[in-house]
Image: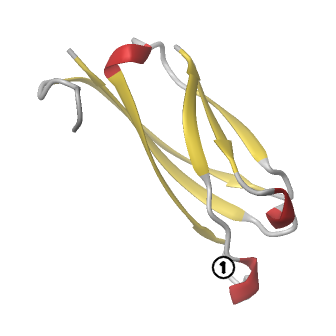
Amino acid sequence: MGTFGSIIKSLQRGTGTMNDVTSLAITISAVTMAKTEILCWSGQSEGAVQSDRTYVSTKLTSTTNIQATRGEGTAGADALVEWQAIEYY
């Protein structure tokens, strides 16, 4: 949990698919950036071959936006992204 408090103020979750793109903007309800952490899980779409495996990173870029990105060489494969924004008091 790092430098965040232990009491959760808000929790937002969602999924998205990066179809042939290297970045994805995710809109969330407003949070306090200094008190929010983002968790991300990623994987390949069903039927993708092992070489299409993709790794995605996420960053809170504003009070209402998460930016998911992946390497330039992986844009041809669909990446499934699951994210969670946890805001603490």
Looking at the image, residue 1 lies above or below residue 8: below
Q: Position of residue 6 (x, y in %)?
A: 12, 29
Residue type at the position of mark 1: Glu
Q: Nearer the viewer, residue 32 or 72?
A: 72
Residue located at (75% from left, 78% from top): 52
Residue at the extreme left of the image, as rendered: 6
Residue located at (16% from left, 24% from top): 5
Say which quarter of the image contains residue 2.
Answer: top left
Q: Is residue 35 left or right of residue 88?
A: right
Residue located at (37% from left, 32% from top): 37
Say which quarter of the image contains residue 55.
Answer: bottom right
Locate the C terminus and report the quarter of the image it occupies.
Answer: top left
Q: Position of residue 9 (x, y in %)?
A: 23, 19
What element does badge 1 sit on? loop
Q: Residues within 10 Å of mark 1 (few under 14, many from 20)?
A: few
Say which quarter of the image contains residue 17.
Answer: bottom right
Residue at the extreme front of the image, as rendered: 3
Which residue bears the numbered disc 1? 46
Looking at the image, residue 79 lies above or below residue 53: above
Locate the N terminus and report the quarter of the image it occupies.
Answer: top left
Residue located at (87% from left, 67% from top): 76
Q: Is residue 80 left or right of residue 32?
A: right
Q: Position of residue 54 (x, y in %)?
A: 67, 68
Q: Is residue 79 left or right of residue 41?
A: right
> What's the colour scheme?
secondary structure
Q: How many marks?
A: 1
